[in-house]
Image (spheres, rainbow, N blue to C red):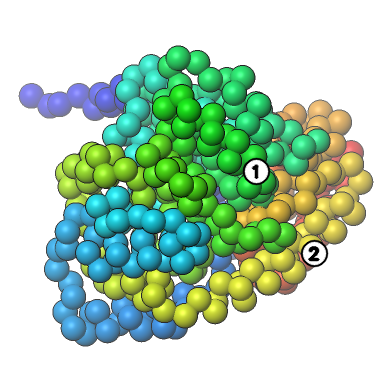
Amino acid sequence: MQATAEIADRISTITVSSTLKVSADAERLRREGADVVDFGAGEPDFPTPANISQAAIAAINSNFTKYTNAGGTQELREAICERHRLDFGSNYAVSECMVTVGGKHAIFNFIQALINPGDEVIIPVPYWVTYKDVVNYAGGVCVFVNTDESTGFEVTAEMIQRHITRRTKLVIINSPCNPSGAVLPDDEFRAIYEITSRRGIFLMTDECYCQFLYDAKPFSIASLPGAKETVIVAGSLSKTYSMTGWRVGFALAPAPIISAMLKLQSHSTSNPTSISQKAALEAMRGPQDSVPVMLAEYRRRRDFVIDRLRAIPGVSIVTPKGAFYAYPNISVAYASGRVTNSLEFATELLAKSHVAVVPGEAFGTSDHVRISYATSMKELERGLDRLHKFIDGLR
């Protein structure tokens, strides 16, 4: 008897990642011969620093190709705790740390380990695409807190406070924010922590872009005295060290939560790639010179992109304070009625002008698109020329 292809109900609670779909659509057009400018992928165009790559080669040559502990090697976990202490002043032990297959994996493990059906998770809008789906997958309830351009997309403790109920289990903060580039002021972050910790609510800080701030010093709420009891850090090496394909992330959390996450990881991926772990060890303990070099270049690109976007009549843009994304309001393009939301806008832009951007619907808004400026100045100039012409053509 042939089995029916009936998909599990829980899969219907999640959607395909919009950012990965944009990349796939752009790649399909390239294969067909189109000259595509890709502003979709959140991926540094810098090579992985040579010392990191050499550490991986050494790992292969020394046959470091076997299983490791499911949560990463002792040495790497120690190095992650040490790096976080050096960068932010935190004080984590190895029992409070685990290595994951990218930062997204850390977030997935944490949400699945903590959230029960019906638990509420507060998420500021715009949000990174995966938060909503992994909460839905766990049976949790997303409670969205809308921010807007008038306040630079910054969420406040007062806004969070208004959305807390007896079912609130978790608040997620992503600063610098993907997609808006907003950076939460340290004092406001502390105020949010005071509210959540007082009520016994967990606070997850997504620190994927923690080193890429243009006007402030890197900060982690986990560095506050006593914060480790209710704060969970989701970290990644992908952006800081241009290691997207290496797939190394980490979590810092109370030991019982790490144990629960490890239980899940032991039955899903098991350990992160052994060779990538050796590369990550060098990233954590080796020279950090590549980080300010990348940041300086991102600043140059940001300023260019902002100037070019503001030169398009009717387009508005909040200057990003961190990360490497611009999140312009392109609703001026809706006036003719030929497109009515950012999904239609992005679809037409790719089809007609061969420029890939991510529609704001992926992040909880309908009047914006996300533009990644983690690409060359030449590509930025070509793509923004096309974007300007496309919008002019919709008037």
Along the horizontal axis of the image, is 371 left or right of 107? right
Q: Quadrant of residue 336?
A: top right
Crowding at mark 1 (Cα within 10 Å: few <14, some 14-19, many 20+): few
**In which quadrant is the N terminus drawn?**
top left
The residue sitting at 26% across, 44% down in the picture is 255
Residue 100 is at least partly visible in this image: no
Crowding at mark 2 (Cα within 10 Å: few <14, some 14-19, many 20+): some
The image shows residue 116 at horizontal and vertical percentages of 32, 23
Furthest residue in direction top, as rendered: 166
Mark earlier in primary sequence (1, 2):
1
SS of the residue under disc 1: helix
The image shows residue 249 at horizontal and vertical percentages of 38, 56
Furthest residue in direction left, as rendered: 1
Along the horizontal axis of the image, is 199 left or right of 127? left
Foreground tag (1 vs 2):
1
The label shown at residue 187 is: 1
The residue sitting at 72% across, 59% down in the picture is 215
SS of the residue under disc 2: helix
Q: Nearer the viewer, residue 86 or 13?
A: 86
**In which quadrant is the C terminus drawn?**
top right
Along the horizontal axis of the image, is 307 left or right of 146? right
Residue under pointer 2: 304
C-alpha distance separating marks 1 and 2: 30 Å
Q: Nearer the viewer, residue 326 or 119?
A: 119
The residue sitting at 84% across, 58% down in the picture is 308
Q: Nearer the viewer, residue 256 or 207?
A: 256
Count how many numbered circles sit on residues in the image. Answer: 2
Is 357 drawn above or below residue 168 in the view shown? Answer: below
| Amino acid at pointer 2 | Phe
| Amino acid at pointer 1 | Asp
The residue sitting at 57% across, 34% down in the picture is 192
Residue 289 is at least partly visible in this image: yes
